[in-house]
Image: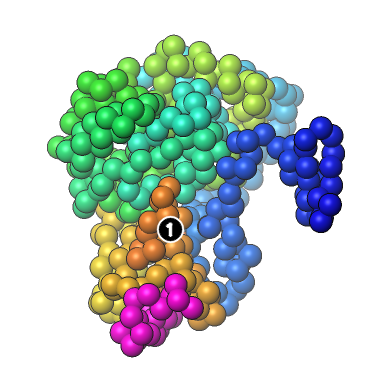
């Protein structure tokens, strides 16, 4: 049968996967992340990685945290090692409400907080609850690669909304809603990262926030507000969350991964009460309950340590690294343009006309520098003339060296484009 292997009925496999024909249709929408695919390369010590968004944990008080973990197990080990509530530990949910006050969400109700395995799980659960195959999810142009993976897996169609230096453009949102509905398609969600956007590095302006919230309220579109970087502004606390303008129209997703440590895998969704009920049921069906030891460890950290001063030290560290990458771009790559972040981990670089970031990546890796092609952040394959640079993990010295190496690749590519034309990537 030319390499095919029949299992049962009409189910067919292949030499590589005898169960290929048995998968559910949605399984064929799962794709490898372009960022994950780079991990084996960027882990090599000689490669300067400007690709991944791993937080830099060198300033965490690891010795004190070790003592804290020892005390937790010694005094509360039976509870920490046991199953917990599907909604999450009540003590931590109360603390999460305090954390959200820094985003302008005042008077939050712990009963409407659902603790999840990172905010990624909250995003997945929300998509499962609201999106049927073929439904439309609106998202910024570009958007978070992990969100695109979730939306594809749930067979959603993503339609991008234009951004500029002030974030999502309200008029573009209105025009896109009208166009998509005129095509007879159903819009279920608007997914947005208003603070220190991944990958674009921009922040939604104070003037646009109430406008975006009002447009979605008027058009009856639920907003998923993803805010993992909110406390990591270089010079100030974040602007008021969209949730503060539309309490019933927004599900707010938060995480301790960037402000504390990703290894605990603790995030949350703060949702309107009716949605909260379904979120709990969906979470229980998926994982039974979030990690109790992770929740209790974070709750103890928030109680015992001056966690906000720790966040401020992270801000200072990331600002130094951001200054290093912006300075290096200005020195080595003046032919490019880029965004100027006010916080977070990333800057978004636009290449000279005709250059293709995805085609250029293997040559960059040979030059011992890594980045993420802009194509990873679009549903429709756009973004080849962009790349995302992450400044959160390398030292300032390594950042400068990485950008210098990248500049040699960009200049060589530009010479080829100038000589053979912009289409040479596709012709060869």
In magenta segment, residue 427:
yes
Q: In the displayed structure, does residue 333 sit left or right of residue 91?
A: left
Q: Indicate whether 89 appears above or below 371.
A: above
Picture quadrant where residue 238 is located: top left
Q: Residues within 10 Å of mark 1 (few under 14, many from 20)?
A: many
Q: Which residues are magenta?
A: 404-428
Question: For this rendering, which residue is in front, 155 or 403?
Answer: 155
Q: In the displayed structure, does residue 297 sit left or right of residue 384?
A: right
Q: Residue at 43% x, 38% y: name it.
A: 157
Q: Residue at 64% x, 30% y: name it.
A: 291
Q: Is residue 106 visible?
A: no
Q: Is residue 357 visible?
A: yes
Question: For this rendering, which residue is in front, 417 or 119?
Answer: 417
In magenta segment, residue 277:
no
How many tags in the picture? 1
Q: Residue at 19% x, 30% y: name it.
A: 210
Q: Indicate whether 395 appears above or below 319.
A: below
Across and down, in percent, residue 246 comes to 27, 22
Could you say whether the residue bearing mark 1 is in a helix, strand or loop?
A: helix
Picture quadrant where residue 97 is located: top left
Q: Indicate whether 237 appears above or below 372.
A: above
Q: Residue at 42% x, 55% y: name it.
A: 381
Residue at label 1?
A: 375
Across and down, in percent, residue 375 comes to 43, 58
Across and down, in percent, residue 240 comes to 25, 33
According to the image, what is the colour scheme of the structure? rainbow
């Amino acid at each position: 049968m030319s390499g095919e292997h029949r299992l049962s009925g009409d189910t067919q496999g292949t030499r590589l996967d005898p169960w290929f024909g048995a998968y559910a249709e949605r399984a064929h929408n799962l794709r490898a992340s372009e960022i994950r695919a780079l991990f084996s390369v960027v882990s090599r010590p000689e490669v300067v990685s400007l690709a991944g968004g791993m937080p830099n944990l060198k300033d965490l008080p690891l010795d004190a945290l070790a003592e804290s973990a020892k005390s937790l197990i010694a005094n509360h080990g039976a509870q920490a090692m046991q199953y917990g509530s599907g909604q999450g530990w009540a003590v931590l949910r109360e603390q999460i409400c305090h954390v959200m006050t820094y985003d302008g969400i005042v008077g939050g109700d712990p009963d409407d907080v659902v603790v999840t395995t990172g905010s990624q799980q909250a995003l997945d659960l929300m998509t499962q609850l609201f999106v049927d195959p073929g439904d439309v999810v609106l998202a910024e142009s570009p958007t978070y690669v992990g969100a695109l993976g979730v939306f594809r897996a749930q067979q959603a169609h993503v339609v991008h909304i234009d951004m500029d230096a002030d974030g999502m453009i309200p008029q573009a949102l209105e025009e896109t809603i009208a166009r998509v509905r005129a095509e007879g398609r159903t819009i279920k969600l608007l997914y947005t990262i208003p603070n220190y956007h991944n990958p674009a590095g921009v922040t939604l302006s104070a003037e646009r926030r109430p406008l975006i919230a009002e447009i979605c309220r008027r058009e009856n579109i639920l907003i998923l507000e993803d805010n993992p970087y909110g406390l990591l502004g270089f010079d100030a606390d974040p602007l008021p969350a969209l949730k503060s303008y539309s309490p019933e129209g927004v599900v707010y997703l938060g995480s301790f991964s960037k402000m504390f440590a990703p290894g605990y895998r603790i995030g949350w969704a703060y949702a309107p009460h009716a949605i909260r009920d379904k979120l709990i049921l969906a979470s229980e069906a998926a994982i039974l309950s979030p990690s109790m030891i992770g929740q209790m460890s974070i709750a103890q950290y928030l109680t015992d340590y001056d966690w906000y001063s720790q966040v401020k030290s992270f801000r200072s560290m990331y600002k130094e690294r951001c200054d290093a990458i912006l300075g290096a771009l200005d020195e080595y790559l003046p032919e490019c343009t880029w965004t100027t972040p006010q916080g977070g981990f990333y800057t978004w670089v636009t290449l000279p006309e005709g250059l293709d970031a995805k085609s250029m990546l293997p040559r960059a890796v040979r030059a011992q520098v890594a980045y993420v092609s802009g194509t990873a952040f679009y549903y429709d394959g756009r973004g080849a003339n962009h790349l995302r640079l992450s400044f959160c993990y390398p030292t300032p010295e390594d950042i400068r060296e990485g950008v210098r190496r990248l500049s040699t690749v960009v200049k060589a590519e530009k010479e080829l484009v100038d000589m053979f034309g912009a289409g040479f990537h596709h012709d060869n």
